[in-house]
Structure formats: structure tokens, C-alpha cells
Image (cartoon, rainbow, N blue to C red):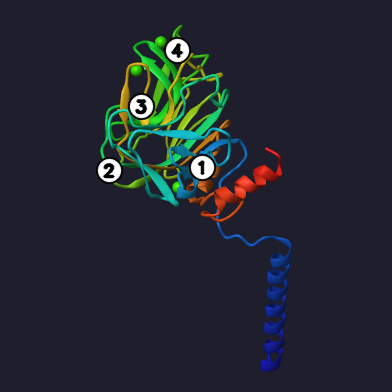
Amino acid sequence: MSPFVMNVRKKAVLGLVAVLITGLGIGIPVDARTVVIEDGLIGYWSFDKDTVKGKTVEDIWGDQDATIIGDLEIVPGKFGEAVQLGGGAGARVQITDDIKKAELPTEEMTIELWAWDEQFIEWGGYVVAVQDNGAFEKGWLLGTRWKAFSFALSSEDADDGDGLLTYLNAASASETNKWYHVVGTYDGKEMKIYVNGKLEGTSGVQSGAINYPDSIFFSIGAYKDDNEDFVHTGMLDEVRLYDRALSEKEVSNNLEAEGLAVEPAGKLSLTWGQIKAAAGR
Ligand SMILES: [Ca+2]
Ligand SMILES: [Ca+2]
Ligand SMILES: [Ca+2]
């Protein structure tokens, strides 16, 4: 092969690559970010500073803005800012204490977040919509049982008359002062817990619709029900709630995700708010 032929071929290949790049640039937005799965998403509390106004934490996807109760701080987090808890008894981010107003998943669900624990307690609560009072066990939560991440859920088919919770614990122990991606899923037949994208536990005890109590303290950052109130000590970030079970592949996607597809973090809430306004919401 002569040097001339080689040269022509290289040029042809480079030309083709250039055409492809140009084509992508015109037709498809080039966005290298992995974005959050939107199918089934019903709530998203990012705790980014431009989404927190006074005591109000905006739900950047749904309509469930939350309220800061107690002395909590917004601090640099895993993505943008996060909420720092542990300031004192009674502190939490209240989504709503009125179950009639709460938008909760009914048949299937996923609860997802990034957690940083400064200490582990026996009954840790990251996101809680539960009543667990003696034999009365209804609702669900994502939190910790000592060093194990734990996803608890009560369903109609497993109801023993006053509700029955399964606390599904992650197989691996976690460590303090580290970020972990923690996800609990329920597809109506099986509960699963994922830590950093890895499946860490499965249970088939619960099936059917989620069994809710008549009253809850639907909150981020505290294991709170009628007779308990244990505050999380550490940070929580990028809390997302879905009304369906994400697959393992989708959990892996969200592990890498840096926010919604709308705009890069920072401009997100403003842009999303404008879209909502434009849509007449
Ligand atoms: Ca954040
Ligand atoms: Ca209790
Ligand atoms: Ca029971």
C-alpha cells in the first residue's frame, strides 16, 4: 500500500467521523450526564440551595413541598447541597403529617437517596411513612437497623389483622462518615434493597397493595411514629420516590445520575418551575 492510498483512507474515515459528530450536534442534544429515571417518579427533594427557601424544601418533581422542623442545615452534599440533621430531638423534614394529603405509592414503590451517617442507631429513619407500635405495623420506611441499611414495608396480603412489617436489611454492614446510595424497591411481590447499585437483600414475605395506617408523620430524617422519634445524625441527599419498582439496571442508572434531564444542576429548579408555569400548572 502506498503512503498516498493510506492518506486518502484516513481522510475518508476522519471525514465520516466529522459528519457523524456534526449530525449529532444538529439533531440530538449532546449531554454526557446520566440523568434520573423519570418514569414513575412522584417526588424529588434534592436539597440544593436554590430549592430551599426559608423553611420550605421544594419537591422539584411533584407537588409535595416539605417543611424543615427544628435546627437543620443545608450543607454541601453528594450532588449540590444536602440536608444535615442531628441538631436535636424533634428535628425532621416534614413532607406532611396528613395521610389524606400525602401522595404515596399504593401498589409498587421505590425509595431512593444518598445517606451519610455520623452514627448508627437501632431504629434509624431516612424516609419514613410508618406506624410500628407493638403488633400494629403499617406503612414503609427506608433507614438503618444499627449498621445495616433497612427497607421496611407492610402489605395487604401479609396483614395479620393489625399489619405486619418486614424489615429487609442489607447483607453488608455500612460505615460512618461515607456517602452511600441506598434504594428500597417493592413490585407487589418482592422487596429488594440495593446499596451502591448492588442487590443486598430480597424478601418475598410481603405481597399485594401497601398497607397504610390512618395516620403518619411522612418525613425525611427521623424515625417518627406515634410512640417513637429518633433523629438521623448525618446528611441526606437526592431523595426520590417512585410509584413503581425500579429494575436493577435503573437503580444502576440512578446511582450515576446527576439530576433531571431538564438542565444541569444549579439552574434546575428555576428551569423546571418555568416549564411547569408554561404548562399551566
Ligand atoms: Ca442535592
Ligand atoms: Ca413505634
Ligand atoms: Ca401485626
Q: What crowding class fits label 3: few (fewer than 14 Cα within 10 Å), some (14-19), or many (20 or more)?
A: many
Pointer 3: what residue? 223
How far apart marks 1 and 2 lie (CA) works out to: 23 Å
Question: What SS does tag 4 mark?
Answer: loop
Percent x, y of residue 146: 28, 31
* Label 4 CB-ligand 3 distance < 8 A: yes
Q: Which of marks 2 and 4 is nearer the N terminus?
A: 4
Pointer 1: what residue? 251
Percent x, y of residue 49: 45, 49
Pointer 2: what residue? 176
- Type of the residue with mark 1: Val
- Type of the residue with mark 3: Tyr
Pointer 4: what residue? 163
Percent x, y of residue 185: 50, 32
- Between disc 4 and disc 1, the foreground one is 4
Asked whether, in this view, residue 195 is left or right of residue 249, the answer is: left
Q: Which of marks 1 and 2 is nearer the N terminus?
A: 2
Percent x, y of residue 54: 44, 41
Above-or-below relation of 276 to 221 = below
